[in-house]
Amino acid sequence: MGDRFEYRNVRVDGDSAPIIEGFSARIPADGLTAMVGASGAGKTTLLRLLNRLDDPDSGTVLLDGRDVRSYDVLDLRRRVQFVGQVPVTFPGTVAANVGPEVDMLLARVGLDPELADRDADRLSVGEAQRMCLARALARHPECLLLDEPTSALDSSSKAGIEALVRMLADDGLTVVLVTHDPRQASELADRTVTVGG
Amino acid sequence: MNDLSGRISWADVALALLLVIVAMVISRVRRTGLESDIAVASVRAFAQLLAVGFVLDFVFDGKAALTPVVLAVMVGTATLTSGRRGKRVPGAYLVAAISISAAAGGTLGVLLLLRIVPAVPRAAIPLGSMIISNAMNTTSLVMGRLRDDLAAHRREVEAHLSLGQTSTEAAASWHRRAVRSGMLPIIDQTKVVGLVALPGAMTGMLLAGASASSAIRLQMVVMYMLVGGGAFAALVAGRLTTSRLFTADHQLIRSVRRVAD
């Protein structure tokens, strides 16, 4: 399989100095790619370029060989789902957050389907993060971008999310995982991209 | 005649200054450090009102064609004030100019078209000034609130965007809150009008010797007009501010995203 994403000589400016400069890398379509690097190296910034929450100040980002800016941005974001560090629940029930396929999706992310009728803001942090993954999967994405998805979790929910993420990659999703944890990268990822240093 | 129109002389104004001096003495004794502010405010009020009185006498005295100019100057001043308040919104001055003009034009237009008030400077200028200053406050509130809320809730906003929603959809709940916050002051004022304080227009008519019943009718028109003008301003300011805080590609602009946590 070819590259899903490619960064070509990307620069992103910060308030005074560039956050990212001259960055190039390829992310294959299959499996799980970890982006590792020290905190402040710009990993999250790079991840956000993939679903165009941000754009580079120079250079290009390609999806399936085409500049990400050439796609309809809303369609791009549906195809390339992003889940952040801290789970964000919307007002209402879990079912309202996830959508019509809630039963199937909750089972897929390892949550009890009985939770569908619970208020989303009453979930534990670990459950909420799984629900956010279910909500992302409800859009039937091709890629999943995960920004430190376990950093807000205790160690048991962390192991659960790691296993789930690995399973999603094995199911054929392109998964890009930003992590500062070298152990997580080496245990989970098929390959790593190092940012900075 | 027991009305005050034409009865206040310059000597009376000078006597009223005694009250300002009392305020300055209190400030000095209580060490609030406001003496110079009080002095500046009093002098400014004197100069500004003197100039306005001169202009209004001139316009009322057969120069009615200048009415739009007077209103435009008021819109301009309100725009500068509101734009400065909302300066963390890119293009705040333009947002303020359009919102305040829309409120003034729309509301005053309805009043004149329906012939609720006569199309004369003596009606259009004072009513216009009330609409404009109210729209100015509403616009400042909406711009400030929306910008601060989107910055404070940027994770939530971006979670919506990441699911493929448009910027309008992603900002909807904060947009609604900002519009509400812009409209609430005038709505609250309308609820308690006459109970907490006799409002300006009505006070003016009573002092000028009008009957209470005609004074309250004018005040009713004024309150309804301000509610309408506030709604206009809040609606336009909310819509324009939202469009300024996102890019055309449904991204939060960087100055909103990169605030310190």
Image: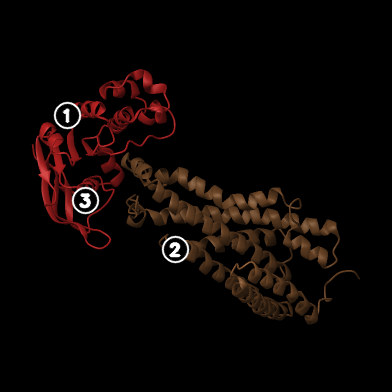
Around disc 3, counting alpha carbons within 10 Å, would you say few (fewer than 14), some (14 to 19), or many (20 or more)?
few
Residue type at numbered disc 1: Arg
Residue at mark 1 to residue at mark 2: CA–CA distance? 47 Å
Q: What secondary structure is found at the residue carrying circle 2?
A: loop
In the rendered image of this protein, does residue B35 appear above or below residue B233? below
Residue shown at 65%/49% (left/top)? B188
Q: In the figure, is residue B70 to the left or right of B235? A: right
Q: In the figure, is residue B65 to the left or right of B153? A: right
- Of the numbered discs in the image, which one, if any, rests on residue B71? none
Please tell me whether mark 3 or mark 2 is closer to you in this view: 3
User: Which one is nearer the viewer's eye here, A149 or B120?
Assistant: A149
Residue shown at 64%/49% (left/top)? B187
Chain that is coloured brown in the picture: B
Q: Circles 3 and 2: CB distance less than 8 Å?
A: no
Q: Do labels 3 and 2 share a chain?
A: no
Say which chain tag 3 marks: A
- Of the numbered discs in the image, which one, if any, rests on residue A40? 3
Please tell me whether mark 1 or mark 3 is closer to you in this view: 3
Q: Is residue B128 visible?
A: yes
Q: Mark 1 points at which residue?
A: A166
User: Which one is nearer the viewer's eye here, B246 or B36?
Assistant: B36
State which quarter of the image contains the N terminus of chain A: top left
In which quadrant of the rendered view does residue A161 lie?
A: top left
Residue shown at 74%/62% (left/top)? B201
Chain that is coloured red in the picture: A
- Of the numbered discs in the image, which one, if any, rests on residue B87? 2
Q: What secondary structure is found at the residue carrying circle 1?
A: helix
Around disc 1, counting alpha carbons within 10 Å, would you say few (fewer than 14), some (14 to 19), or many (20 or more)?
some
Residue at mark 3 to residue at mark 2: CA–CA distance? 29 Å
Q: Where is residue B148 in the image (x, y as percent from the top left)?
A: 44, 52
